[in-house]
Amino acid sequence: MTRQIVLDTETTGLSAEAGDRIIELGCVELIERKLTGNNLHLYFNPERDSDEEAIRVHGISNDFLRDKPKFAELADDILRYLEGAEIIIHNAAFDVGFLDRELERLGKPPITDCVEKITDTLSIAKALYPGKRNSLDALCTRLGVDNSGRTLHGALLDAELLADVYINLTRGQETLLIDLGDVGPINLAGAQVDLGSFDLPVLHADDDEQAAHEQSLTQIDKDSGGKTVWRQAAIPRS
């Protein structure tokens, strides 16, 4: 079973080393790349005020956080939730730096000792779209993820958006599986399956689906500078 946790934090400022703290943690669980609904969303009393610029970004007031639990009170619960999972973060160095600093204060080892691995979607995006803007908002726009409700940064909302972005960024990496009911899933990458005994329906794309497909091909061709194979093959040669 592949368990992944898409994680985001909001903080009092930009520097964990200078004493800024985590004020919000949002986590979205994926099992076999599917949302489970077993999410984690927490606010913390950071024991200091947030910078004004940070408040403008996330909109979380100092007064709102005063009665929230301290990170230390929930650290063990957080580590149990994350244990053994692949953690997916956008610009991982930032969030991991803050998490490690919070754990260091408690005499606990860094987050990498608890999880299987950490995947940075910013690194993936930079490799796929070199030279382009690869912020979460930019990726939502590029990949067709609806972020219209993101007027302010919020850890859970951003984790939910990032989960959708991650699936789109890595959709070519799935193993092809067919569910044959009681027979169970068969991995076509490592087995030969005779489908002759199955009545497989043919589902034709409707006009809207064909138009959306053509729009996607056009955008891919635009991003590649007109170098896609299917466009070049369509050009008659003299």
Image (tube, grey):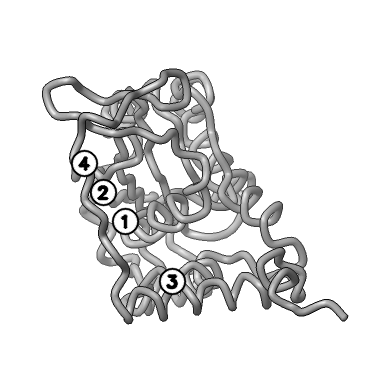
Callout 3 amino acid? Gly
- Residue 36 badge: 4
Q: Secondary structure at mark 4?
A: loop
Residue closest to the far right: 238
Which quadrant of the structure image shows residue 38? top left
Q: Mark 2 near mark 3, Cβ–Cβ under 8 Å?
A: no
Q: Residue furthest left?
A: 182
Task: Identify the residue under disc 2.
Answer: 41
- Quadrant of the image for the N terminus? top left
Who is closer to the viewer here, 187 or 172? 187
Query: Quick one: SS at disc 1?
Result: helix
Measure the C-alpha gap from mark 1 to mark 2.
6 Å
User: Of the residues shown, which amino acid type is indicated by label 1?
Assistant: Leu
Q: Which mark is residue 109?
A: none
Q: Which residue is mark 1?
A: 156
Question: Sequence-wise, which precedes: disc 1 or disc 2?
Answer: 2
Distance between the alpha carbons at the discs numbered 2 and 4 = 14 Å
Q: CA distance from mark 3 to mark 1?
A: 19 Å
> Which residue is label 3 attached to?
144
Q: Nearer the viewer, mark 3 or mark 1?
A: 3
Work out whether residue 133 or residue 207 is closer to the camera in this orientation and state it: 207
Does the CB distance between marks 3 and 4 fall below 8 Å? no
Q: Is 71 on the left or on the right of 124, as rendered?
A: left
Q: Nearer the viewer, mark 3 or mark 4?
A: 3
Taking 123 as reference, is 203 left or right?
left
Q: Residues within 10 Å of mark 3 (few under 14, many from 20)?
A: few
Is disc 2 placed on a helix, strand or loop? strand
The amino acid sitting under disc 4 is Thr
